[in-house]
Image (cartoon, helix red, strand yellow):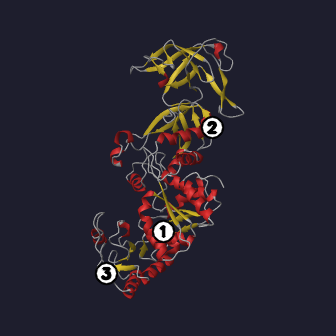
Amino acid sequence: MAEANNFIEQIIDEELESGKVSAIMTRFPPEPNGYLHIGHAKSLCLNFGVKEKYNGKCNLFLDDTNPSKEKEEFEEAIKKDIAWLGFSYDRITHASDYYEQIYNYAEKEIELGNAFVCDMSPEEISLNRGTLTEAGKESPNRNRSVEENLKLFREMRAGKYADGEKCLRAKIDMASPNINMRDPVIYRILRETHYRTGDKWCIYPMYDFAHPICDYLQGVSHSLCTLEFEDHRPLYDWVGITLGFNPKPRQIEFARLNVTNLVMSKRYLKKLVEEGKVDGWDDPRMPTLTGIRNRGVPAEALKDFCARIGISKANSEVQISYLEACIRENLNLNAERAMGIKKPLKLTITNYEGSEEVDFEINPNEEEKRTRKVAFSKNLFIDEDDFSLDPPPKYYRLKKDGYVRLKSAYIVKCDDVIIGEDGKVKEVLCSYVKESKSGNDTSGIKVKGVIQWVNADTCRDIEIRDYGYLLKDEEYAGQDFSERMNENSVMIFNGKVEPYVFNRQFGKPYQLIRTGYYKLLDVKGKTVLSQIVSLKDNFNK
């Protein structure tokens, strides 16, 4: 067996060695009340990684115990995200698959004297729960007989009482230092149509009661949860112990994934969608897995990121530049190169006549180097950011009387400029050095700058979209999401690209040299270049 990579694998190794467990089974348990986000990717990689390492099993378990917020749409999106990441589950299960069994276990808790029907409202229960320093007050219904509790609970199921009129509570300890153990509600009345069971049920189990039961019924050996469930573990164990589960699943908590500049809250992501701040759950700025996929991030890059940050017991925040570095590393090896201009500036080579094709390298990282032909003429576009009338020191791009190399083509010298009525440079007039062609340069001229270009005679117009972060963490760290929103997170350019870009399949990533990584999208009939990640790499710096 391979050496353990984290504390969870160390625990599993010890239990296998001692014989406490003989087979490993995990489950990935999202609630179908929204789309998965990047934080779920860590849990996916952990649960399915444990399955693969120990030759075990892993179920997709949908926690559908709150019908007011859950939809089939969200379940289908979850399945697509898991498939995109390349994981395969052994079974799809739902809490609703086990509603009858969960109900029977609730009756068993009543019969054992471990649960009672309470007439207090949710507000009264909360007020009487106590504080961290003061014990809670027991419900006046706490000592009802088993017979009365069974009768009332069955009447709850039959629909005799209104929502909130009664509930079923576990009878544990109102003086427990863990507030979750102070007679928690384990069933409530809720008249909502369930997306799978319709109106069959009007009472639903609480997650903390359904969770350990569903784990046991599925044969889960290790229930891997994020740290917010650590205080709920005593209740998870209480349910398993009182109901006599053998073997009882073991809950282990790990730190959730937090990334700077990203909204890591399903509730707030839903708010962004509903308020129209983004163009749906799959908006390329969204940290949802469907948004990340739509942006063009390779699944392997996201899995690599999750592997590198590891599994720990302490909460922390990962810089988004680390994620971007993983994406760049993957795309640098796999993306083809192309030339495009975000802010076109006309460049005319006054001493060049005719046209030709130059060799352009498809990907410099390929073992067997391949090239393709790119049309070249006297009429070109360069990016206006690559020319300056008043350049700063150590400016290696194009300037008046300065030299620069056009990528894969020739060295040119800026001889003059044409200024428009608005005072801005309208056109750059250059001469080329005939003996300086890339791959056969005999000019002896040394230049430090290389810039991209497109042939004005053959290039295509295209909308280029760059994206900023949804959150401005540097300025508003720790404040509410609403105070940290970046209102300018989409930048649109009317650019130019070589025609080669239009010959590629939609969705395939490639690098616009010196600019960033992009994918070609069809947005309502319009062809758009959508940014995956820039070339800037703050993490490695």
Q: Residue at x 38, y 21 (%)?
A: 422
Q: Which mark is residue 333?
A: 2
Please tell me whether mark 3 sits on a helix, a strand or a loop: loop
Please tell me whether mark 1 sits on a helix, a strand or a loop: helix
Which sits in the foreground, 235 or 394?
235
**Percent of width and height locating residue 100:** 50, 78
Q: Amino acid at mark 3?
A: Asn
Q: Is residue 531 visible?
A: no
In the rendered image, the quadrant that contains the N terminus is bottom right
Mark nearer the N terminus (2 vs 1): 1
Marks 3,1: beta carbons within 8 A: no
Residue carrying label 3: 141
- Residue 118 found in image quarter: bottom left
Mark nearer the N terminus (3 vs 1): 3
Q: Which mark is residue 347?
A: none
Q: Which mark is residue 211?
A: 1
C-alpha span from label 3 to label 2: 67 Å
Q: Is residue 481 visible?
A: yes
Q: Residue at x 61, y 21 (%)?
A: 377
- Residue 451 found in image quarter: top right
